[in-house]
C-alpha cells in the first residue's frame, strides 16, 4: 500500500487504495491534521530518489577511479621491475 510522508510532522500517512478509480489528491495527516497534496509530495519524493541515486552513482564512480589508479600504479611498478631485470640479465 502506498504511503506519503507528512511534510509538517514527518509521520507516514497511508494512502487509501482506490483501485481503478481516481486517486486521492489531498489527504489529511492523522497526526497533525495538515492537508497534504499527494501529487506534490509524490513528485518531491521522486526528486529525492533521483538525487539519492545520483549520489550513489558518483560514489561508485569515485571507487572505480581509485581502483584504476591502483591498477595503473601496479602496472607501472611491474613494468619497471621487468625492464630493470631485463637490463640486468642482458648486459
Ligand atoms: Zn502531519
Image (cartoon, grey):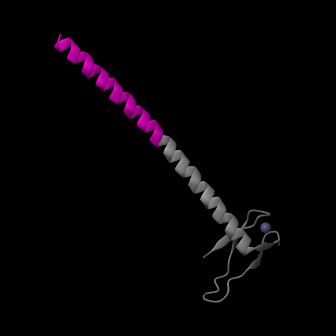
Residue at position x 62%, y 56% from top?
Answer: 51
Say which residue appears at 68% left-offset and 83% top-offset.
Answer: 23
Q: Residue furthest bottom?
A: 21
Vertical relation: 15 (above or below) 90: below
The answer to whether residue 47 is above or below residue 57 is below
> How many numbered marks have been drawn onto this rendered protein structure?
0
Depth order, front residue of 37/9: 37
Q: Residue furthest front?
A: 91
Q: Which residues are magenta?
A: 64-91
Q: Position of residue 81 (x, y in %)?
A: 28, 20
Camera-side residue of 44 and 72: 72
Quarter of the image for the C terminus: give it: top left
Against 53, residue 45 (above or below) is below
Residue at (66, 72) in percent of width and height? 3
Horizontally, residue 55 falls left or right of residue 8, namely left
Magenta stretch contains residue 78: yes
In the image, 72: left or right of 44?
Answer: left
Res. 24 image quadrant = bottom right
Looking at the image, the residue that sits furthest to the left is 90
**Residue 34 rendering spot, x and y as whole percentages:** 82, 71
Rendered location of residue 45, percent (x, y): 66, 64
Is residue 46 located in the magenta-colored stretch of the structure? Answer: no
Q: Residue at x 47, y 39 (%)?
A: 65
Q: Position of residue 59 (x, y in %)?
A: 54, 45
Report the image quarter containing ligand 1.
Answer: bottom right
Q: Is residue 29 visible?
A: no
Amino acid at each position: 500500500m502506498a504511503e506519503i510522508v507528512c511534510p509538517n510532522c514527518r509521520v507516514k500517512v497511508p494512502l487509501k487504495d482506490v483501485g481503478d478509480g481516481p486517486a486521492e489528491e489531498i489527504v489529511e495527516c492523522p497526526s497533525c491534521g495538515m492537508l497534504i497534496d499527494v501529487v506534490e509530495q509524490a513528485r518531491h519524493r521522486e526528486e529525492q530518489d533521483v538525487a539519492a541515486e545520483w549520489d550513489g552513482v558518483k560514489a561508485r564512480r569515485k571507487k572505480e577511479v581509485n581502483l584504476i589508479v591502483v591498477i595503473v600504479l601496479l602496472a607501472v611498478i611491474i613494468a619497471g621491475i621487468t625492464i630493470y631485470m631485463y637490463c640486468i640479465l642482458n648486459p
